[in-house]
Image (spheres, grey):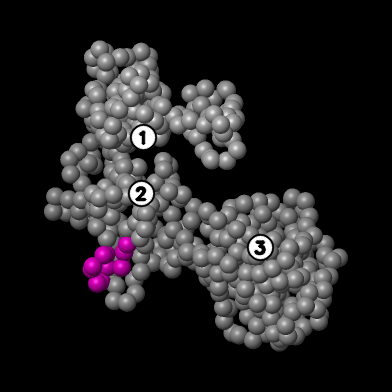
Amino acid sequence: MEYYDGWGPAMIRLSWESPSIPGEVIPRDMYFLPTKAISANPPNCAIGVIHTPTLRWDPGDGAVYHYVYFGSDYNDVANANINTPGIYRGQQDLDDTTYVPTEAPLEWNKTYYWRIDEYSVTGAINTGHIWSFTTADYIILDWFEDYIDLQPDRIFDTWTDGWGIADNGSQIGYSTPPFAEQEIVNSGLQSMPFFYNNTGGAAYSEAVRSFGAPLNDWTREGVQTLTLFFRGYPAAFVEDPAGTYAMGAGGEDIWGQADEFRYAYKMLSGNGSIIARVVNVENTNEWAKAGVMIRDTLDPYSVHAFMCVTPSNRRSFQNRQIIAETSFQAYSDVNAITPPVWVKVVRQGNNFTGYYSQDGASPNPQNIVMSQNVYVGLAYTSHNVNAMGTAVFDNVTTTGTVTGDDWQVEAIGADMPVNEAQPLYVVVRGGGVEKVVEHPDNPNAVLKYT
């Protein structure tokens, strides 16, 4: 497959057929569009592919129509022409960029090869790349790769959710294209977003799909187990057991001129401090950060003092001394600490000092002008805009005039999806029989992000 990117001064051409050959830089004045078919789906070398696949591609530049080749032997497909029976699968119009193998369902755990040649407006035949995929050795009930953003192949055209049903709080897919999830996947390129909202009269959240032949036979080939892959979002801030707090957050970072993180806070008037033990920081990035913070405002650009630890076992005292200006920090090398780690920030007037437990004070008190009344609390960023993570704190104490019995929790600088604990279950109906299976970790299964 060739990939062309960019209208800038240069572009990159990558050859997936010759991985030992490095990509070459092509000057912009030599820019051209690919004449071969591109964007294979299933992707080249995909594994675990459904046994009834729909092959898809995008036409090359100048194509008039396509020649389709398909088989289970690489050399047969590579050497085939329109006179090769069994491998040549016919000519298709330019707008027809899909093909379903006539022998589907295909064999289990077998590699297949396919090629799309383009007949050009110039009369030339542009021989396509040899793409391959391997079928699964299990039944795939839903091949999410086939969903697109047009009727009738949108994900919610197949799955029936709670749309228009007062007591069903479910929603399948996003509200705007792309409707399927394309970042959080178990494998392949897409997954199914499922949202639940058991409020406002909704008593449950369920989505339903019916299966026709051959997918309605879940016992063929001796299959005995149904497996579902799912991932939820962690809770924003949960105390369980008493005195131990789990915080879920995303966010790009607490750094630079603006911050993205989750903050559990109370109000501090005048001098005071906060101490906590960071039990664990999920490794969403080596610079994910969890610790204690004193902050002037809840604005992302606010001045602050932050003593934190990272999954790479660094400790860092960082701060922003001027609103919306660059942050500063003093930090250790990796593996300088061993979790759990005690962290502390102390305010004395406009002097803020960070501490950690293993060898005392960080020798870097900072002068930061803040208001009389400031925010004091626990802060965490996953340092990864595509991943939610979890940090765990315990032994949290404060000194000084701190108000608020309960922690207030807010996402600073970015939206961060979270879940509330609810039972997760699957209902299977068939032949007049219904079976309900609940997840053994209910009600916290939906809080699992891994």
**Main SS of the magenta segment?**
loop
Residue 254, disc = 3
Camera-nearest residue between 253 and 448: 253
Residue hosting label 2: 228
Residue at x 52%, y 22% (from the top left corner): 18
**Residue 77 location, x and y as percent?**
34, 18
* Residue type for callout 1: Asp
Residue at x 72%, y 66% (from the top left corner): 325
Mark 1 and mark 2 lie on one chain; the one further toward the N terminus is: 1
- Can you say which quadrant of the picture contains the N terminus? top left
Camera-nearest residue between 85 and 203: 85
User: In this view of the protein, can residue 66 be seen by the observer?
Assistant: yes
Q: Residue 199 falls in which quadrant of the image?
A: bottom left
* Residue type for callout 3: Ile
Q: Residue 57 falls in which quadrant of the image?
A: top left
Residue 293, disc = none
Q: Secondary structure at mark 1?
A: strand
**Real-space Cα separation, disc 3 to disc 2, in angstroms:** 35 Å
Q: Secondary structure at mark 2?
A: loop
Mark 3 or 2: the one toward you: 3
Q: Residues within 10 Å of mark 1 (few under 14, many from 20)?
A: some
**Residue 229 location, x and y as percent?**
39, 49
Q: Residues within 10 Å of mark 3 (few under 14, many from 20)?
A: many
Residue hosting label 1: 58
In magenta, the rendered stretch is 162-171
Q: Looking at this rendering, what residue extends furthest in the right direction?
A: 363
* Residue type for callout 2: Leu
* Residue 183 as seen in the image, left or right of residue 53: right
Q: Residue 368 falls in which quadrant of the image?
A: bottom right
Mark 1 or 2: the one toward you: 1
